[in-house]
Amino acid sequence: MSLMDDCIGQAPILVLAVGNPSRGDDAFGPLLAQQLQSWLATQTAEVQQAIELITDQQLVVEHALDLQGREQVLFIDAAARHDAPVAMQAVAPAPDATKPSSQHDQPIQPSVNSHSSTPGGLLALYQSLLNQPPPRADLLTLRGEGFELGAPLSDTAQALLPQAWQLLQGWLDQALAHALATATNTERAGHA
């Protein structure tokens, strides 16, 4: 049995790390993605097949299609304005992106910007395009101090990487357990 049996070629878990490695603390996403890639190389084939990692400089509308066939998605990004130094939070479709302004109005299509998007905006776009609920999604953020071109990762961000990695590993443990349980239940239902 494989975790990918009912995902039609898609890994059930998607990790989408965004950021520019040449812009200070914006390198947080790509650096954590590199650490995840190294970790994946040490895992079983089943775990490797269950997780897809995408790294990009920013979220774009095309990433909405990367959400298809996924059970769970984790976005990783640095944020200039964030309360906690490192945080994990659930993401929902951006509520204002698809809500009609009155009961007589047609639902508004999500705002589409081809050059950048937010996790909530991508989930809303996915929901609008495919007319189905998006996969469960979470966002792992690091509060960045500087995003200047050519700047290295700040000492503060460097010190927070181990905490971010622990949150990522905890999320992966839960996501893998869920994917394995789903695959097991699907296999049982197929034999009944």
Image: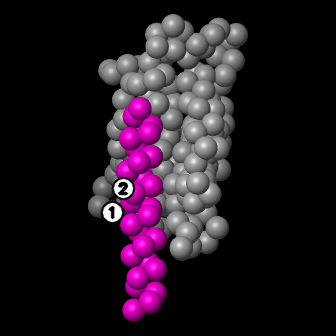
What residue is shown with label 2?
100
Residue 123: percent from the left, percent from the top? 47, 52
Q: Which residues are magenta?
A: 166-192
Q: Residue 189 sits in which quadrant?
A: bottom left
Q: Is residue 56 left or right of residue 3?
A: right
C-alpha distance separating marks 2 and 1: 8 Å
Residue 172, magenta (yes or no) = yes
Residue 187: percent from the left, percent from the top? 46, 80
Residue 66: percent from the left, percent from the top? 61, 55
Tags 2 and 1 in contact by the CB under 8 Å rule?
yes
What residue is shown with label 1?
104
Q: What residue is shown at x 46% (from left), y 31% (from top)?
A: 165
Q: What residue is shown at x 46% (from left), y 13% (from top)?
A: 159
Q: Is residue 113 left or right of residue 13?
A: right
The answer to whether residue 190 of the structure is visible from this angle is: yes
> Relative to the observer, which residue lies in front, 59 or 16?
16
